[in-house]
Amino acid sequence: MDVLELLDRARRGARALARLDGAARDAALDAIADAIEARAEAILAANAEDLAAATDISDALRDRLRLDEARVAGIARAVREVRAQPDPLAARREIGEGRSGIRVTRRRVPLGVIAIVYEARPNVTAECAALTIKSGNAVVLRGGREAANSNRAIGDAVAAGLAAVGAPADAVIVMDRSSREDVAALLGATGRVDLVIPRGGHGLMAMVDEHARVPVIRHGQGICHVYVDAAAEIGMAADIAFNAKVHRPGVCNAMETLLVHRDRVEAVLAALGPRLAVAGVALRADPASRAALEAAGVSADAATDADWDTEFLDLVLAVRAVDDLDAALEHIAAHGTNHTASIVTADEGAAERFLGEVDASCVLWNASTRFNDGGELGLGAEMGISTSRMHAYGPMSVTELTTEKLVVYGRGEIRS
């Protein structure tokens, strides 16, 4: 079946889903979580096939792909966390009366048919299915080839959950194919898809730029920055930077570039550099940072211009000394990707300038970039982290998958 036929099926699924109330959609999510738990063994077997075939991916990407019993349990738990959220479609907003006396309100409604393109993250299959069902949308899921078997197995569990409660099967469609032509078809399917969410790197975003004819919200590269200010507490700065890089280096909210005020570069890198070396982090540093690292007994390669614009998604870190806050802000403006940036400082004025001037979906003061995550921020599971300055900027949960329509109540008024 070609992409357009799948989207037509999804449109029918969206209309059927619209007829279900919040309780029925929640029942579907309960059944999906139960099915994922019941099929854990089959999901893990499928994931083992994917891992065996994925011989050409980095260790960090392998970690994103890998499932175990705890991670499968976490997927089911994430579905239940979505189910526990308030029904976004129950929201009503009174606007007031028009000049003629009509009563004007706004009501939350689904976006319609959403397509998501993502890579080696099988948990995304279940979490995005849960988010779209909760918000009343149909979804077409196009995962990467590395996770094809895992996605299929999780998709089967989702289908079983929908069937168990009589919910529309076409509300969630997992594409079996993963060709570039299919992505181009999704991006060009005017009138059939209401929103495409691409989650990936530079290559995928280049495809979006070339082929998109439908609305797109980018969930793009995470070239995330931590800036250690002159007023930073050294131990805190080292802990935050270490966590931001090492905790899970293959995810989009991991730090890729560390900026350090020139007055603190020796102290910060003396505290942090050996820890990074023990963790296996390869360092690429400008001359001042490289000298400070070598003084601490840590080797580093010379950074190139390309390093400042690279999402490593691995145990690799670019390090640069900057003269002051203005220089840090200028670097982030030139090389950031509107994703995440953090400042470590005891200077409230410097922090407020950073929080106000950095253009990123999440800015943090004295905290790791790893907190730009729907669950960690108390928003629940997410479709991804929007780096588009649209109605959603940052983690997209159920509310961001809806819009508002006007609902007008009259008593026979006509316009004169």
Image (cartoon, grey):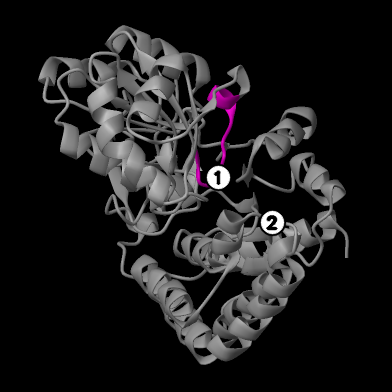
- Quadrant assignment for the N terminus: bottom right
At which x and y percent is residue 83? 37, 70
User: To which quarter of the image does residue 170 belong?
Assistant: bottom right
Residue 65 lies, with reference to residue 307, above or below; the image says below
**On-image quarter of the C terminus:** top left
Label 2 to label 1, Cα distance in Å?
Answer: 11 Å
* Nearer to us in this view, 181 or 31: 181
Q: Is residue 314 magenta?
A: yes
Classify 174 as above or below 344: below
For mark 1, does the 10 Å Cα neighbourhood hold few (<14), some (14 to 19), or many (20 or more) residues? many
Above or below residue 261? Residue 222 is below
320 relative position to 307: left or right: left
Q: Nearer the viewer, residue 200 or 57?
A: 57
Give me the residue at 72% from left, 74% from top: 52
Q: Residue at x 49, y 39 (%)?
A: 386
Q: Is residue 219 visible?
A: yes
* Residue 92 image position (x, y, % from top left): 31, 49
Question: Is 303 covered by the magenta stretch?
Answer: no
- Left-right relation of 233 to 98: left
Q: Amino acid at mark 2?
A: Ile
Q: Which residue is mark 2?
A: 57
